Image (cartoon, helix red, strand yellow):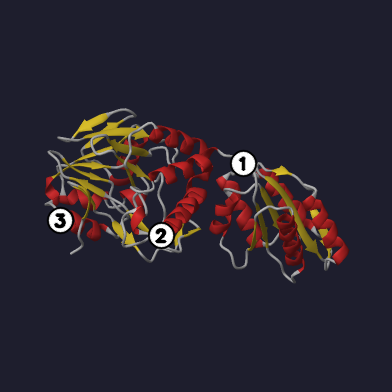
Amino acid sequence: MMQAIEMKKGIYWVGAIDWALRNFHGYETSRGSTYNAYLIIDEKITLIDTVKEGFTDELMQRVSSIIDPSKIDYVISSHLERDHSGAIPAVMKYCPNATVVTSLPHGLKGLKSYYGEYKYQGVKAGDTISIGTRTLQFVTTPMLHWPDSMITYCPEEKILFSNDAFGQHYATSGRFDDECPISQVMEEAKKYYANILMLYGRQAEIAYKTVSGLDVEMIATGHGVNWRSHVKEILAGYKEWSTAIPETGAVVVFDSMWHSTEIMATAIAEAFTVKGIETKLYDLKVNHISDIVTEVLTSKYIAVGSPTLNNMMMPTVAEFLCYLRGLSPKNRQAFAFGSYGWGGQSIAQVEEELKKCGFTICLDKIRLENIPNQKQLAEITQKIIDL
């Protein structure tokens, strides 16, 4: 039987580990993920969140290792997305008398639409529920990253149940940040923010400020490991990612057919390096877009290159730019480049997409016919150095 893991006296992690997950809505999850749920034993027994459908047995085994599930009084639903709420119908069969607590109005409306009628209690920002010796205080976080999203704070235990905020897609046998290499945890937290929450930077900033005003010793996340030894570090990360305008760093992204655009990309990356700017070079044939946008999050410059294929940019480049535009990073400097055989339409198309992303075009598009020569590459290098 799967066992619950005690986090503090009477508070247990009862979630599920998805070791095999490798894709989450187009975001590559090379280290898997977890679906975190928490059981609080008090006068009113409370389950905070459930798990993705298909992992219900793991959840219920962990709950059953502590208590008869029929004794659960409250099921807190922090977020409608089905990696958190998917097991609610199955859970409610075990505890049919439990009250499902969710946010007003979107959580309540969504749960009814998804799963039908149960005994619901809607809550809004600032509402509290006493479960005995502990109090649960609700903080709504709309659009972080759905309209219904909320977090739950227990002041007596100084625990924040943060749902999607501060999480990571990271499968591990350790449940806490200090049980794993912290460099890996922060890497996955940054990637999670970049690929899921970047679009909602203003809301993430509000969440950071809200949490900073609470006395928090532990952050119990919706995915990945929980924070107890490095709370200050993850809060500092969210402060930087949600509010800071990158002052340095360059990302050069390209695809190439016969290496000419690749030669240009390499020269551009080298020029940024000569300029003293840390640079990452990504070939879209081998690098996943979710890893690339993780670096875009903290980089000032982005250069995107494509040859012309059938009068268009390469499909890989179009996919990347579509994904990037959806995440809506702001305050970046960008330019387009590429080689071509005759038409050369792709470079202007890339530049137009970069404009649609909201970037400032810092260099006019760089178009070279056929194979770049050394004089042309030297001119490109000088343009980058002069930025």
Binning the other alpha carbons within 10 Å of mark 3 as few (below 14), some (14 to 19) or many (20 upward) gives some
Q: Nearer the viewer, residue 43 or 256?
A: 43
Q: In the image, what residue type sits under mark 1?
A: Lys
Q: Provide the secondary structure element on which disc 2 rests.
A: loop
Q: In the image, what residue type sits under mark 3?
A: Ser
Q: In the image, what residue type sits under mark 2?
A: Pro
Q: Which residue is mark 3?
A: 64
Q: Provide the secondary structure element on which disc 1 rests.
A: loop
Q: Provide the secondary structure element on which disc 3 rests.
A: helix
**Residue 284 lies in what quarter of the image?**
bottom right
In the image, residue 119 lies at what x, y percent?
20, 38
Q: Which residue is mark 2?
A: 181
* Sooner in the amino-acid sequence: mark 3 or mark 1: 3
Which residue is rendered at x = 74% and y = 70% of the image? Answer: 259
Q: Horizontally, is 160 left or right of 208 in the view?
A: left
In the image, residue 270 lies at what x, y percent?
73, 60
Number of numbered callouts drawn: 3
Q: Which residue is mark 1?
A: 330
Q: Nearer the viewer, mark 1 or mark 2?
A: 2
Q: Nearer the viewer, mark 3 or mark 2?
A: 2
Q: Nearer the viewer, residue 87 or 149?
A: 149
Q: Alpha-carbon distance for marks 3 and 2?
A: 31 Å
